[in-house]
Each structure stands twice: as C-alpha cells, then as structure tokens.
Image (cartoon, grey):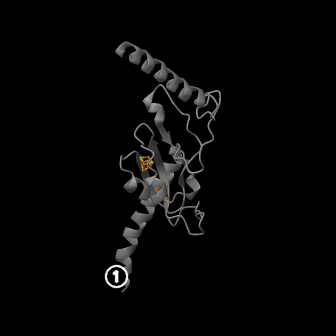
C-alpha cells in the first residue's frame, strides 16, 4: 500500500510542477536578449554621471557630499583683471575657474548625492550605462575644459592681482 501511495505522490507532484511550468510559457517575458536588445532605462536611472562644465561654479558641494571621495576638483579665483571674464549661466559673474574636475567611476557607487547637492544642476546622471573597460585607470574621467596653458594663465593672473593688492594697501593706509 505504501508503495502505491509513493507512486501516486510522484505522479501528482510531477503534474503539479508541469502545470506551473506550462502556465509560465504564456506569460510576458521579463528578460531580454542583452546586449542584442537594450533595456529602456527609467527616466531617473542612476547611470554614469556627466558634467556640464559651463554650469559648474567650483562650489565644492559635490565633493563634500560624495561618501566615497571619488570627485576631485581644483579651482582658482577669477582675477578682476582677467580679460576673459565670464557671465555664469545663472546671470552672475563667474567667481572661480574650475581647473580640474575628475570623477573616478571605479569608486563611484551611483548614490546620486552629488547630483542632489549641486546647486546649478551641473553634475547629472547621463543615459550612459555601458562603459566597461579592461583598465581601471580608464574609469577616471576628466571633465575640465581649460587647457594646462589656460590654467597656468589663470593662476598667474590671480597671483599677480593678489601681489598688486598687497602693494597697493599700505599706500592707501598712508593716504588716510
Ligand atoms: S554618485 Fe555618489 S559616489 Fe558617485 S560621485 Fe556622486 S556622490 Fe560620489
Ligand atoms: S558640479 Fe555642482 S556641486 Fe560640484 S563644484 Fe560644480 S557647481 Fe558645485
């Protein structure tokens, strides 16, 4: 009797499994044939970051917000004597030149905190999510647009302005 019960249980469990499997033959597929087929990413997906340099004012908020320290920036103040004064995208004068802006995507955890912290929407998530590389160094993205020569020029202009300021002040005091 036990022998027959075991056979019955085997047959019924097989049919139960087959029933579940055959039901799934007719449901909508949730997988796609990546990379031949591409998934349409949601509008707010946290893909690779991108930077609109003209909007960046070098405020450092993204650097402070980043929990893994993968953003590094250098800035130099804009000298009032700089012949290339720039009106910032929000209508104000640019106060800082951003001479270096680097994000190391080997460290980035795509938390989006830098995006939330940026006051000018300069750093945002892009639509790019396929950027695997063989060399980790290739994941260090450099966004600065000033050339090394331009950076030296900006630093020189500001240093000269500061030096001039120092020499002018004692004379002003004497005049008082
Ligand atoms: S997404 Fe997060 S981890 Fe990546 S750079 Fe921004 S703050 Fe840092
Ligand atoms: S990207 Fe935004 S938060 Fe970062 S330095 Fe530029 S303006 Fe500031």
Provide residue 52's location: percent of width, then percent of height.
57, 52
Q: Classify residue 20 by image quadrant.
A: top right
Q: Residue at x 54, y 33 (%)?
A: 131
Provide residue 97's location: percent of width, then percent of height.
50, 57
Say if 31 sits above or below 70 in the image. above
Q: Nearer the viewer, residue 61 or 45?
A: 45
Q: Is residue 3 left or right of residue 102?
A: left
Q: Classify residue 62 by image quadrant.
A: bottom left
Say if 97 sits above or below 25 in the image. below
Q: Classify residue 70 by image quadrant.
A: top left
Q: Nearer the viewer, residue 162 or 100?
A: 100
Provide residue 112's location: percent of width, then percent of height.
46, 51
Say if 110 sits above or below 79 in the image. above
**Circle 1 — which element?**
helix
- Disc 1 residue crowd, few under 14, some 14–19, many 20+, Cα 10 Å: few
Q: Nearer the viewer, residue 132 or 29?
A: 29
Q: Residue at x 50, y 44 (%)?
A: 148
Q: Residue at x 45, y 64 (%)?
A: 161
Q: Which residue is mark 1?
A: 174
**Which residue of the protein is positioned furthest toward the bottom in this rendering?**
176
Provide residue 99's location: percent of width, then percent of height.
48, 50
């Amino acid at each position: 009797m036990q022998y027959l019960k075991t056979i019955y249980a085997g047959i019924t469990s097989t049919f139960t499994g087959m029933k579940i499997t055959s039901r799934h033959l007719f449901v909508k597929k949730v997988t796609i044939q990546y990379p031949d087929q591409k998934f349409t990413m949601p509008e707010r997906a946290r893909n690779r970051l991108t930077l609109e340099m003209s909007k960046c004012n070098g405020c450092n908020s993204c650097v402070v917000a980043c929990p893994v320290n993968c953003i590094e920036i250098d800035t130099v103040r804009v000298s009032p004597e700089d012949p290339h004064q720039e009106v910032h995208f929000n209508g104000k004068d640019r106060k800082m030149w951003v001479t270096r802006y680097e994000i190391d995507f080997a460290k980035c955890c795509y938390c989006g905190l830098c995006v939330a912290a940026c006051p000018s929407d300069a750093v945002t998530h892009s639509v790019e999510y396929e950027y695997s590389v063989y060399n980790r160094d290739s994941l260090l993205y450099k966004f600065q647009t000033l050339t090394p020569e331009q950076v030296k020029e900006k630093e020189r202009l500001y240093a000269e302005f500061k030096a001039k300021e120092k020499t002018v002040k004692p004379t002003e005091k004497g005049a008082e």
